[in-house]
Image (spheres, rainbow, N blue to C red):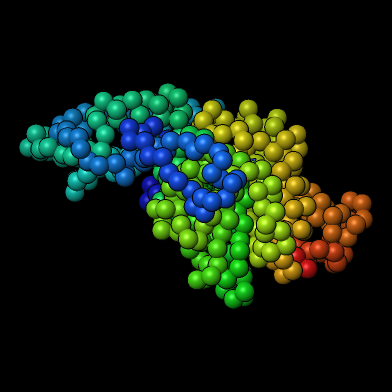
């Protein structure tokens, strides 16, 4: 899926069954008068490399030496990680090395320093981190399988560059499709564009920020998460995109901090934890060793959180409200649809109804549909509140 000419935002293929900074910035959340937010301590935020000031210097020679060493380290991995746990091949690691240099070197230079002649060797280049730290970071990438996005502190996602750090899920390319679906919905209906949307389990704030940008003047987003680190990172990303008046951040479990908007939402989006607990140890080392379990683990069947969201959607959406939930590829859509069906028409969940759910759902929801991702994987369940 990844070729050398792909843009940077398609650099990392992760299917679920597929960030340390010197300057510490404590951010304040928006709508800070809300108790659910201000009562919890916020975590310090790590500034991504590309946003750091270029206060260090080095020479082209030093950069060549580093690039040579780092390339060789990457190449030495061959297909070892791929074979082990579907991890990155050496060719992807070499591309990541170029991206790391792009983020860290402040100059017009191409990032392939090895191609420069020896006459350039003594030229001085400005850097956003010290040379020694670059060596540490690259060792972490290869030896500890620390995700590249945590190394550089950001992820290129859709048309955004989102800050990420340990404790926050790295947003995945397939989740971008949720924004496309929301865009379609708001294009068709002005009321949806001006209403209140909810992003449950916002993580880095990817969905909240992207949806905030597609809404109209009056439209706004509430982005929630149980994790204070996620809330801080989301706050940083919201501020970077100037959306403080549009995206409100609340800390709490699912619908718990949302009583005041019950029955008033025009849309709910969520990419909740949905990986069955027993599948987690078999994930890529980058994921299992470094990404937050809170963002991944959906309980025994992977359905614990999804079921709560289905039930909550019925009481929190206003009539006509839209929802989209991301889930795992392996047949969870049917389980979600069954759960919705059971909730909405008061009948007990029955396998007989699965095939007929579209026609039989005369309860709270209509137009229940499964939508596939870029790879044809049945990844999303969407629908509208009656
Ligand atoms: C799969 S991640 C998705 C993050 C982000 N929406 C994205 O797509 O990149 C799930 C998120 O749900 C959050 N979460 C887990 N349990 C939660 C709960 N009970 N209430 C609210 N958020 C929760 C996690 O902290 C994590 O940020």
Q: Nearer the viewer, residue 157 or 55?
A: 55
Q: Nearer the viewer, residue 22 or 172?
A: 22
Location of residue 381 in the rendering, given as x and y in whole percent from the top left corner: 70, 56
Location of residue 375 in the rendering, given as x and y in whole percent from the top left corner: 59, 52
Q: Is residue 356 above or below residue 110?
A: below
Left or right, residue 128 beside residue 4: left
- Residue shown at 57% from the left, 74% from the top: 187
Q: Is residue 190 above or below residue 277?
A: below
Left or right, residue 296 beside residue 114: right
- Residue shown at 12% from the left, 37% from the top: 124
- Residue shown at 36% from the left, 36% from the top: 24
Q: Quarter-wise, where is residue 345 in the image?
A: bottom right
Q: Nearer the viewer, residue 127 or 142?
A: 127
Residue 147 is at least partly visible in this image: yes
- Residue shown at 18% from the left, 30% from the top: 62
Q: Quadrant of the C terminus?
A: bottom right
Location of residue 220 in the rendering, given as x and y in whole percent from the top left corner: 55, 63
Left or right, residue 346 beside residue 50: right
Number of marks drawn: 0
Location of residue 66 in the rendering, given as x and y in whole percent from the top left corner: 25, 29
Residue 15 is at least partly visible in this image: no
Q: Quarter-wise, where is residue 60 in the image?
A: top left
User: If the picture is divided into quarters, which one holds ligand 1?
Assistant: top right
């Amino acid at each position: 899926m990844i070729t050398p000419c792909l843009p940077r935002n398609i650099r990392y293929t992760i299917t679920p069954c597929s960030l340390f900074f010197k300057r510490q910035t404590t951010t304040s959340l928006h709508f800070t008068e809300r108790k659910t937010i201000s009562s919890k301590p916020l975590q310090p935020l790590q500034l991504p490399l590309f946003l750091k000031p270029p206060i260090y210097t080095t020479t082209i020679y030093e950069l060549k030496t580093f690039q040579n060493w780092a390339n060789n380290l990457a190449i030495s991995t061959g297909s070892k990680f791929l074979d082990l746990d579907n991890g990155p091949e050496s060719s992807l690691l070499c591309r990541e090395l170029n991206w790391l240099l792009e983020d860290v070197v402040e100059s017009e230079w191409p990032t392939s320093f090895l191609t420069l002649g020896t006459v350039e060797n003594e030229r001085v280049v400005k850097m956003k981190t010290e040379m020694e730290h670059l060596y540490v970071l690259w060792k972490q990438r290869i030896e500890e399988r620390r995700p590249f996005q945590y190394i550089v502190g950001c992820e290129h996602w859709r048309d955004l560059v989102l800050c990420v750090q340990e404790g926050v899920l790295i947003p995945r390319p397939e989740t971008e499709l949720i924004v496309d679906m929301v865009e379609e919905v708001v294009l068709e209906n002005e009321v949806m564009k001006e209403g209140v949307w909810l992003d449950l389990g916002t993580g880095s704030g990817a969905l909240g920020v992207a949806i905030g940008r597609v809404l109209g003047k009056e439209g706004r987003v509430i982005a929630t998460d149980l994790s204070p680190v996620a809330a801080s990172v989301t706050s940083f990303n919201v501020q970077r995109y100037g959306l403080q008046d549009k995206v409100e951040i609340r800390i709490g479990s699912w619908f718990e901090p949302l009583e005041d908007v019950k029955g008033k939402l025009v849309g709910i989006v969520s990419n909740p934890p949905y990986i069955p607990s027993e599948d987690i140890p078999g994930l890529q080392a980058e994921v299992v060793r470094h990404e937050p379990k809170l963002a991944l683990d959906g309980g025994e069947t992977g359905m614990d959180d999804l079921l709560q969201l289905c039930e909550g959607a019925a009481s929190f959406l206003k009539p006509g409200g839209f929802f989209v939930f991301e889930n795992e590829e392996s047949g969870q859509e049917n389980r979600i649809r069954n759960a919705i069906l059971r909730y909405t028409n008061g009948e007990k969940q029955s396998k007989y109804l699965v095939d007929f759910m579209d026609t039989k759902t005369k309860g709270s929801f209509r137009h229940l549909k499964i939508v596939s991702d870029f790879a044809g994987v049945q990844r999303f369940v969407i629908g509208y509140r009656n």
